[in-house]
Image: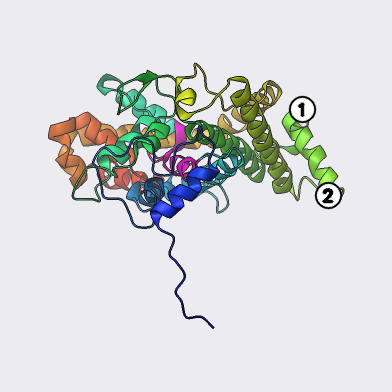
Amino acid sequence: MSSEIPALRSRSDFEREETIQLAPWAVPPGGSAGRSSPEAAHSYRAGIQRDRARIIHCNSFRRLDGKTQVFLNGTGDHYRTRLTHTIEVASISRTIARSLRLNEDLAEAIALAHDLGHPPCGHRGEAELDRLLKDHGGFDHNAQSLRIVEVLEEKYPQFHGLNLTWDVREGIQKHADGYFHPLTGEAYTSPSLEAQIADLADEIAYSSHDLDDGLDAGLITLAGLDELPLWRRALAQARKEAPNVDPARHRGFVIRCIVNHLVDDLVATTAENLQSAGIRSLDDIRRHDRRLADFSLETRKELSTLRRHLFQNLYLHPEVAGANEKAARLISELYHHLIAHPAQLGRKARARIERDGLHRSTGDYISGMTDRYLARQHRELVATGE
């Protein structure tokens, strides 16, 4: 038996092999424009692989476990949190990227970071912070996610933030008004295809799992879903695969069929769009006048119908909306209290006041809270009158 040690696979080996496998319009393994602060290359990991690890290990990522997706955190053991939502988005993103021969690590890293900036209490919490900060730049969770990885995370002595590769930061912006390449200064219209599919994977994930959670909570009924073409299509596919399927007992199986259909449609439509647009390079993707990752027109209409159903029957349901309104009140009262008593801000937030201003520092502080910590701070600082 040979005692020879097998050859190790270095970073350069991986990057060379991966580049051969990727489509010519995919972002290369090490990224296309480097980092804001140059760093020495790792022996075994490509740049974007390191980004993925930095995101997973940061404080903001861990706090997603305590933040609301739809139902306030702690109201049920099986409801999605912002963290489990993020994991589902990352999984779907990798599947789509692999099918289209894109950079899977990049698509996953963008997905893992896309909701880092979400405040407590879901979208209602975001709307409340935006209202409170309207005279100080407003609040948008996509912009806040970028702010977290560029400024707020404090882990490395050499730089602020996580110093992620530019391609990951490009994807985190999601729907920017415009983009500028850091090497050339050239303005362009669309982000990488990896960023585009991570955005759509987010839509697939929340549309399907919010439906699942709504059914679990009894706020959405199976009878009401019969009017939705996407549900009927998925149920027919589920019965084809398992003739005795019971939607009441096996709704997860039916919802899996929804996800599969949306992913298949997205992959097929995007491939057609790439061919018809004559895409040959990453520059072609960025210079194209519209995003090329998309669903077919029929599927887009079906998905829009599902989303309207979720708004009418889940997001605006008194059980959900009422709890979120109460949580938004906690955000507002805590915000005004901290503006009046800035010494009660967290240590890091206080240290940023001189640079970023009191209002932005307070918004940063509250947006980083979990639902539980928001309630605790409100109870200890506001409710007690301290």
Where does residue 281 sit, x and y in percent of width and height?
A: 49, 28
Residue wearing tag 2: 242
Quarter the N terminus occupies: bottom right
| Residue 137 drawn in magenta | no
Q: Residue 144's x, y, as percent? A: 34, 33
Q: Residue furthest right?
A: 243
Q: What residue type is labelled 2?
A: Ala
What is the span of residues highlighted in magenta in the rendered image?
103-123
Q: Quadrant of the C terminus?
A: top left
C-alpha gap between disc 2 and disc 1 = 22 Å
In the picture as drawn, the residue positioned furthest to the left comes out as 354
> Is there a contact, CB below 8 Å, between mark 2 and mark 1?
no
Mark 1: amino acid: Glu
Q: Who comes first in sequence, dot 2 or dot 1?
A: 1
In reply to whether residue 115 is colored magenta, the answer given is yes
In which quarter of the view is residue 147 placed? top left
Horizontal side of 41 relative to 261 (left or right) equals: left
Residue 268 visible in the current orientation: yes
Query: Residue most toward the bottom?
Result: 1
Left or right placement of residue 374 versus residue 319 in this view: left
Horizontal arrangement in the rendering, residue 49 relative to residue 222 (left or right): left
Residue underneath mark 1? 227
**Residue 386 seen from this side:** no
